[in-house]
Structures are given as C-alpha cells and as structure tokens.
C-alpha cells in the first residue's frame, strides 16, 4: 500500500502529466481512499458515497454479466471491453476539458450498454454507440446529474436506428457457434408466428436476445438486491412491471393475436432488465414519489403499446427514453400540486 | 398506567456508535479559577452586579437583570472577581466574569428553600426557581413572574419533559436519575405543576430506556395529570419543532419558540435543578456532562462547576497523541471547541471527542464495512443492526467520499423530519433562484438539524445551502409569512 501511495504521489509531481490530473486524482481517491474532512455541523457524516453507491449497481449486475459471458463467451468479453475502453476515454477527455473530477456514473453506463446489445454486434458499432451515448446522452447536458436521458439507452437507440439490419435481426442462441444461423427472439417469434416461449426457457435465459437480458432469474435477484440496499427505489420497477402485467392481461383477453399474454410479456425481451436497471436511474426518473408512480405506469403502458402495435418488436427502450423526456414535466406538475399556495 | 407509544416515520436512528458514555459519574475538584459567562441558556445577557476586586461566595448572584427576559447568573466558587471582560464565546460576543478561588468550598444557599415545598406558596416557588437560575433551562426557559421566559407561568398550557435519546451520543438517563434522584425528579415535576397550575404535563421517554420508564411510571402513579409517551430513538426528536407536533399535534411557526404556542419543553436536568433550588436552595452552579466519543480514554460522566475551563475538564481524559476534534453536545449541530481556556456553561450536556479522519483507508469503497454507519444498506453493518450490539460503529470526521453532483437518490427527502425535499431547495439556491418559490417549497420549515447533509450520497452540504437560501431571501426582503393564529408572549 505504501508503494502505491508513493507511486501516485510521484505521478502528481510529473509535469508532463498535468493535463491528466483528473485521471490521477480519480486513482488517488479511489485507491488510497477519501481524504477530505467534514467542515463541522455535521461533524460526522454517513459512510456512503457515490463510489460505493455505484459499486452496488455493478455488484448487482455481476450475475447478469457472468451469465452473458457464459452464454456468449468471447463476444460478451469483447463487447464489454470495447464499451469500457472507448466510453472511459470519452469520459476522461470530457473531465480533462471541463477540469472536473471523473464521475463514477460511467462505470454503470459502460456495463449496462453492452449488456443490452445483441451478442454479435460488430465492435465498431459498439464503439459508435457508446461514444454517442456518453456525449449526447450525458455530457451535452452538463454531465452526471444533469442528463435528461439514460446515456446507455441513448447509445442503444442511436445504433438501433442507424444500423437497423444489424441491430434487430442479428440474434443468436446462447452457446451457439460463431457462424451459427440467426434466430428470432421470443418477442419477434410471437409477432410473426404467434409462438410464446416457455417460461423456464425465459427464466434461465435459453432464448435469443440481448446479451445480459436473457437470464431473467439473475436480473430479478440483482434488482431485488438493489432495492434492499436502498440504491434503487421499488416504486418504479414495481409500477412498471405490474402495469405491463395488468395491461397485457386485459389486452390479451380482447386482442390475443396482437397483445401477448401477461406472464410472457413480463419475462420476454428487456422488460425486467429495463425496469430494474434503467428505469430506476435516479437522475433520469422523477424524484417525487407520485412522479415515480406515474413514470412507472406510463412506461408500462407505452411498452405494451409499442410491442403490440408498432413496427418494432421491443418497446422497453423507447418507452423509457420517451418517459425520460417527460420526467422534468412530471416532477413540476407533482410539485405544483404538492406545494399549492394556500388559498387566500 | 402504560405509556402511549408514538411512532415517527422520518428522521434517522443512530445505532451502536462507539464512545457511548457509561453509567458512571465522578465529581471534579473545585477549580482554582472560573470564567462565568453572563449569558447562559435561555434569555438575554445580564448586567454584572459585582466589581473587580470584590469577594464573592459560591452561589452568590453576580449578574442579574429583572427587566429583560433573562435569569440570574451565579458565582460557582468562593473567591475574588479578577476580571470582567467581553470575549468571543462559541461565536457570540459575551461578557464574562473571571473569579479566582480562595480555596474555600462552602456554598451560599437561597433563602426560603424548604423540603416542605408542599406547604410553600406559589410565589415563593416562583422566586426560588428564578433566583436559582434554573429558569434559564430548556429551549424557552421556565416562566416565572420575573420575566425569565417570553410568557408568564399562567399562560403555559403544556409542559413537556424531554428524555429523548436521539443523538449519536446521549447522556445516560441512568446516571441522571440514579438512586433516589428519581424521586427528586418526580417531586420536581410536582413543584412545577404548582408553579404552572393550568398546564398539562407530558413526558417523552426514549423507548429503549425500559427500566427507567417502569421506575418512573411507578413513582408517577400518584401524579395522575401526566401523560407518558415513549418515542423512538430517532434524530432529531429532541427538537421542539419535531417533538411538539408529534405529541401535541401543534406546529411551531417559523421564528417563534415553543413558548409562543404555550408549550414549555424541559430536559431532565432542568427538572432536577428546580427540585434542588426549591427544596435545598442550591442554585444552578454545577452541571453533569457526558464525555463521549472515541477520543476519550474512558467514556464517563463528570460533575463540574459552571465556569470550569475545558482544559481542567479534559486534562488526562483525552487520548494522547491523537488528532481529536472536540464538539459541544451534538455531532450534527454542535460547535467545535478549539479554545481550551473557554469555560463550560449551563448549556453543556456533553463533550464529544471525535478522531479526526485524517487517516486514509486503502480501497475504502470496496470494503465490507462491518462498522460503517449508513442510511442506505450498502455496508455489511446493516446486516448486523440489532443482531450484535457489540459491533460499534466508528466515529471519525472523514467525509468518506468526494463531493459529486446531486443524483437525486432521495435519501435526504426520506429522512427530513419536517418533510422538505432538501435537494430541490439545494438546486434552487445553487442556481441562485432566490424567489417566492423557495418559500412555497417551505424553506422556512427547515430546523437546521443537518440530517440531510449527514445522509447525502454526493457529500453535498445541503443544510448549509438551505441556510444560505434563507439568508439570501432575507436580504431580498422576503420573509416567512406570519402565522394566522394568535400567539402568546413576546416574539423572540
């Protein structure tokens, strides 16, 4: 430890690395631990910090990441590595230009983004997506805490629209060989042929889909872990998933060809991943409690509508991004009601 | 009689922190010199009524002003007045009287005091409570006809005895009420009842103090007019602004005291001071102080004369060679004590010695954190909560992280005892949007408990921003609207 500390101390003194200050500071604080003291009143503060908070999300994603590596081997490692390296570089460049510390939020974006991609996505498309997501999803708005949209979803949305052929038809089964034929995801199989995949296959991940989204059981466990640690709030995922379930239950009764049955809807596609890991992002979802309910319910309705009545098979990504845009408005309206000036 | 349990959803429970004071007490020697501030506790500063060179006795009144809202101040030792000067006492310019001891340990008691207080007329009680200085206790003082509070004794509707242990470190109720002192306490309550005949009496006790509660209830049973409540061990339930709405359902308007809505909140030492004054004529010249926190060799209680300088209290009691921060009364809202020549006053309940968190922790954010406190449950400590009270949580002054932009995690809103959205106010103040909207968002409801800053994941000093916001509003001439119901007494 002394060795590390003296090494970092030396790095601080190298003049040529002055420009890299944010990077060295991040290493310093991350490895050697926080050094600031409280100013007093309060003299003691909570031990939680953003690093710990964000590491909990990473920890919750570890099972899903391991599952994707197990299912897709080198493809998964390739995607995650590219996302972290390219996206991390963008983040560091922005920190250097803006002269602020490197913010930990990227650790999450950089992992969530590859997990929502088809496993055979070409490397350069991954790089384009993560650069776009970080720049236009986050940094353009002023960085962490000010972004309106979830950066990972912005990147995913961009490459879906820019490279539709690669991004919507290029699915593989888990454990498939590199040259295996592409197959349909459960949601597209329902849309084209009306087949619903079996519940067990969906739960353990024995279906085609985005790398990290298929093994639903570990996603549910990760999501529950986040809620128990208070890192994410239960309101959004609970409202989101139960709305999808209820809407599908009623819809399937009247329009069985278009609207898939409720259990299938909840477990197919990216719903669980989106509800537990993306809709819960505190920055891009409403902060008011009522707002969280409205956000979750609206996401649920939009998801089922897009899945059933649009040209796209999956609606989770679109519905979260659309609702992200409404999130400031939802909060404003809720606050307007909550703090209505007393009538004279 | 079973106590009524009150629940409180907000606030925060500080569990199992290291450095809780043990139920032991030792009496300090009479100091060779004391410095007595002329403003102690509730009320204005009083004028000195002694001169330099004058000989004074312990218990003799050395500062008194019957016109302003104030209580008398006494010499705490026998000796000679050597200086009367103005000093900066914990951020306020205060006149202090310095007295050098002549080694005599006698004490001048108040005339008219008697153990037969039952036969005492109410105005004798009134005078004794005032002359003893006990009337400066509590957040609004104890009303007497000598202007010791902002209302008169007959205007008091509710008296709340506060035995809430909501801080990180709390003075031990066992020490305060040990042995037959408990009976002094109940007698003290009855004396106050005689002083404020129209008032209803309530007592709020910490839910974890079962033994004290049951003993108190036994002794209390003849006193039928007291409502006993148990309240959770949650910060900041010791504050009037939170406790009174919880117990009485009444709100204290911003800028006013509990007394203005007819309520007086007193802690346990205040009741004991009343008993001592009325039955034995002992003025308030001594205070029991808890020595808390990991910076002390031993966490105990000491009984010290008021005016004793901190150095005399702390010498040989703090751990040597350690970087220590001394804090008065509360880790969340207390002043830092830097000048060891400053004296203690009636307002001291505890002195907390925290280790300065200058030692950095290697790979801090990935540690399991068995002894790390957090509102969130991101450390292992949350699993051991309640299971193992032996694992004590650390108290050092490290910030435990770097300041980051707000991510709206909502922890501050979850704990805010007065239902504000602190991060919303913070964004407004940070962006310098100082307008009516802030008042609309109830910025004046904030009670500066600093709990939002405590829990903040991004290490933002939220409470400071909110305070700044109120000051900036005042600069622009925007103030909190006055309450639309009648209030008692004078505005503080």
Image (cartoon, coloured by chain):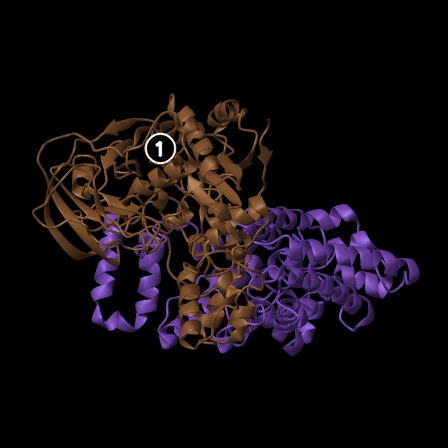
Specify whether A149 is left or right of B294: right
Q: Answer whether residue A228 is visible to the viewer in this image.
A: no
Q: Residues within 10 Å of mark 1 (few under 14, many from 20)?
A: many
* Residue pictured at 38% horizontal, 76% vertical: A98
User: Farthest residue toward the right?
Assistant: A254
Specify whether A272 is left or right of A115: right
Chain A representation colour: purple
> Secondary structure under badge 1?
helix
Of the pair B208 and B40, the residue shown nearer to us: B40
Q: Which residue is mark 1?
A: B278
The C terminus of chain A is located in which quarter?
A: bottom right
Q: Answer whether residue A215 is visible to the viewer in this image.
A: yes
Residue A252 at what x, y percent from top left? Answer: 88, 59
Of the pair B132 and A99, the residue shown nearer to us: B132
Q: How many numbered marks appear?
A: 1
Residue A212 sits in quarter: bottom right
Chain B representation colour: brown
- Vertical placement of B92 versus A94: above or below? above
Of the pair B2 and B147, the residue shown nearer to us: B147
Which of the chains bears the disc numbered 1? B
Of the pair B444 and A251, the residue shown nearer to us: B444
Residue B13 at what x, y percent from top left? Answer: 48, 42
- Vertical placement of A136 versus A6: above or below? below
Residue B347 sits in quarter: top left
Residue B145 at what x, y percent from top left? Answer: 40, 47
């Amino acid at each position: 430890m002394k060795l590390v500390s003296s090494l970092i101390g030396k790095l601080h003194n190298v003049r040529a690395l002055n420009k890299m200050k944010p990077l060295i500071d991040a290493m310093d604080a991350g490895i050697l631990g926080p050094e600031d003291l409280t100013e007093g009143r309060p003299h003691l503060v909570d031990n939680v910090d953003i690093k710990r908070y964000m590491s909990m999300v990473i920890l919750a994603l570890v099972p899903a990441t391991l599952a994707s590596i197990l299912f897709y081997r080198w493809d998964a490692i390739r995607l995650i590595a590219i996302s972290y390296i390219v996206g991390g570089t963008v983040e560091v460049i922005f920190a250097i230009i803006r002269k602020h510390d490197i913010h930990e939020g990227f650790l999450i974006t950089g992992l969530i983004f590859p997990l929502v991609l088809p496993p055979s996505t070409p490397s350069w498309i991954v790089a384009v997506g993560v650069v776009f997501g970080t720049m236009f999803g986050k940094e353009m708005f002023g960085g962490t805490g000010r972004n309106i949209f979830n950066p990972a979803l912005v990147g995913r949305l961009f490459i879906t629209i820019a490279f539709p052929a690669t991004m919507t038809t290029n699915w593989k089964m888990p454990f498939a060989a590199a040259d295996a034929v592409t197959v349909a995801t459960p949601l597209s199989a329902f849309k084209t042929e009306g087949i619903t995949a079996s519940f067990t296959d969906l739960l353990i991940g024995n279906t085609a889909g985005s790398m990290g989204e298929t093994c639903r059981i570990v996603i549910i466990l990760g999501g529950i872990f986040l809620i128990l640690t208070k890192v994410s709030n239960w309101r959004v995922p609970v409202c989101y998933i139960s709305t999808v379930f209820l809407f599908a239950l009623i819809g399937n009764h009247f329009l069985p060809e278009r609207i898939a049955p409720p259990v299938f809807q909840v477990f197919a596609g990216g719903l669980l991943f989106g509800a537990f890991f993306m809709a819960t992002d505190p920055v891009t979802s409403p902060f008011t409690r009522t707002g969280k309910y409205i956000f979750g319910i609206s996401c649920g309705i939009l998801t089922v509508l897009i899945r059933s009545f649009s040209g796209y098979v999956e609606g989770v990504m679109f519905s979260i991004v659309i609702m992200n845009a409404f999130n400031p408005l939802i909060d404003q309206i809720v606050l307007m009601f909550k703090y209505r000036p007393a009538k004279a | 009689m079973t106590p009524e349990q009150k629940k409180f959803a907000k606030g925060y429970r500080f569990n199992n922190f290291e450095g809780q004071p043990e139920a032991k007490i030792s009496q300090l020697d009479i100091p060779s010199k004391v410095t007595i501030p002329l403003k102690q506790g509730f009320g204005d500063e009083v004028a000195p009524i002694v001169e330099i060179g004058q000989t004074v006795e312990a218990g003799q009144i050395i500062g008194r002003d019957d016109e302003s809202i104030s209580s008398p101040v006494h010499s705490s030792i026998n000796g000679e007045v050597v200086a009367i000067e103005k000093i900066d006492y914990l951020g306020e310019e205060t006149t202090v009287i310095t007295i050098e001891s002549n080694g005599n340990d006698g004490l001048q008691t108040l005339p008219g005091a008697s153990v037969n207080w039952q036969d005492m007329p109410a105005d004798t009680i009134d005078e004794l409570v005032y002359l003893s200085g006990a009337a400066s206790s509590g957040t609004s003082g104890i009303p007497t006809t000598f202007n010791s509070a902002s209302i008169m004794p007959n205007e008091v509707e509710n008296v709340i005895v506060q035995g809430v242990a909501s801080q990180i470190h709390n003075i031990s109720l066992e020490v305060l009420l040990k042995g037959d002192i408990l009976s002094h306490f109940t007698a003290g309550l009855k004396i106050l009842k005689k002083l404020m005949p129209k008032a209803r009496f309530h007592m709020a006790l910490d839910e974890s103090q079962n033994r004290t509660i049951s003993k108190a209830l036994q002794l209390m049973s003849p006193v039928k007019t007291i409502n006993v409540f148990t309240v959770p061990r949650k910060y900041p339930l010791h504050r009037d602004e939170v406790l009174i709405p919880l117990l009485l359902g009444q709100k204290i308007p911003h800028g006013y005291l509990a007394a203005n809505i007819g309520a007086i909140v007193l802690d346990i030492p205040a009741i004991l001071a009343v008993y001592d004054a009325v039955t034995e004529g002992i003025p308030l010249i001594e205070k029991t102080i808890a020595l808390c926190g990991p910076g002390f060799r031993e966490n105990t209680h000491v009984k010290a004369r008021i005016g004793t300088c901190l150095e005399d209290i702390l010498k040989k009691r703090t751990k040597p060679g350690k970087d220590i921060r001394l804090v008065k009364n509360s880790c969340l809202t207390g002043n830092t004590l830097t000048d060891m020549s400053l004296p203690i006053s009636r307002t001291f309940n505890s002195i907390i010695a925290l280790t300065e968190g200058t030692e950095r922790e290697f790979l801090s954010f990935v540690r399991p954190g068995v002894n790390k406190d957090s509102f969130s449950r991101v450390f292992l400590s949350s699993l051991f909560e309640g299971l193992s009270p032996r694992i004590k949580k650390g108290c050092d002054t490290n910030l435990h992280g770097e300041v980051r932009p707000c991510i709206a995690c909502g922890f501050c809103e979850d704990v805010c005892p007065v239902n504000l959205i602190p991060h919303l106010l913070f964004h407004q103040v940070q962006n310098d949007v100082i307008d009516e909207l802030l008042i609309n968002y109830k910025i004046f409801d904030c009670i500066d408990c600093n709990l939002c800053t405590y829990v903040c994941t991004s290490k933002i000093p939220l409470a400071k921003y909110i305070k700044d916001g109120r000051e900036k509003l005042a600069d622009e001439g925007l103030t909190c609207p006055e309450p639309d119901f009648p209030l008692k007494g004078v505005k503080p």
